Image: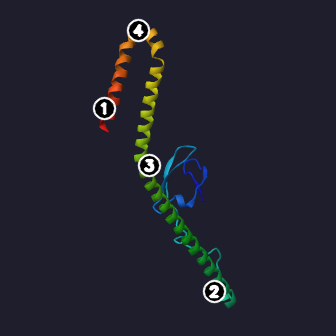
């Protein structure tokens, strides 16, 4: 469907399934105007007669033709409404499944960050161990700190081994 911004008249092509029956807040990409857009119900629109016709002048065959046309139009409208209802049901089901999937990933994100942190910490210790001698030559006071760090890491290693 094509939606027009009421502020700047910019036209947007938006999928029908993205707008629920209650309406949705939309934001114009051009002027950043925000408004509530509701889908107009086609079946509730009043039909208007474009021609003034006397009932006396219409032949019975023409009445049947007009009734057939109205019947076809009603069928098309009911099909469109049924299709829109199906699309909205499918979109709400998709949104529910996405929210369930997102809730599954929130816990795994924490563990992913924890693993990245641990790997980064181990990489830093290996880098410090590799560059220990050049760092001590440049910063003589760093020798005591590095010695204490490596002794602490050995103590943690022994503690973990003793847990088994």
Tell me the mark number nearer the camera, choosing from 4 and 3: 4
Q: Position of residue 96 (x, y in %)?
A: 45, 59
Q: Position of residue 130 (x, y in %)?
A: 48, 20
Left or right: where 28 falls relative to 108? right
Q: Are marks 3 and 1 in contact (CB under 8 Å)?
A: no
Toward the bottom, the furthest residue is 60
Q: Are marks 4 and 3 in contact (CB under 8 Å)?
A: no
How far apart are the two marked residues, 1 and 2, measured between alpha carbons? 100 Å
* Sequence-wise first label, 4 or 3: 3
* Most foreground residue, 44 or 122: 122
* Sequence-wise first label, 2 or 3: 2
Q: Position of residue 117 (x, y in %)?
A: 42, 34
In this figure, which residue is indicated by the disc labeled 2?
Answer: 55
How far apart are the two marked residues, 4 and 2, measured between alpha carbons? 109 Å
- Quadrant of the image occupied by residue 125: top left
How far apart are the two marked residues, 3 and 1, measured between alpha carbons? 33 Å
In this figure, which residue is indicated by the disc labeled 1?
Answer: 159
In this figure, which residue is indicated by the disc labeled 3?
Answer: 105
């Amino acid at each position: 469907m094509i939606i027009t911004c009421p502020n700047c008249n910019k036209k947007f092509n938006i999928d029908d399934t993205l707008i629920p029956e209650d309406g949705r807040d939309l934001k114009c990409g051009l002027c950043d105007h925000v408004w509530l857009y509701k889908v107009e119900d086609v079946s509730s629109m009043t039909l208007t007669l474009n021609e003034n016709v006397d009932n006396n002048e219409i032949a019975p065959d023409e009445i049947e033709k007009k009734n057939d046309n109205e019947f076809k139009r009603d069928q098309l409208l009911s099909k469109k409404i049924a299709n829109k209802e199906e699309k909205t049901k499918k979109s709400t089901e998709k949104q529910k499944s996405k929210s369930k999937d997102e809730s599954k990933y929130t816990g795994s994100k924490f563990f992913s960050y924890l693993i990245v942190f641990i790997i980064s910490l181990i990489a830093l210790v290996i880098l410090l161990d590799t560059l220990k001698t050049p760092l001590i030559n440049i910063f003589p006071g760093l020798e005591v700190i590095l010695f204490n760090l490596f002794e602490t890491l050995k103590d943690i290693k022994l503690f973990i081994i003793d847990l088994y």
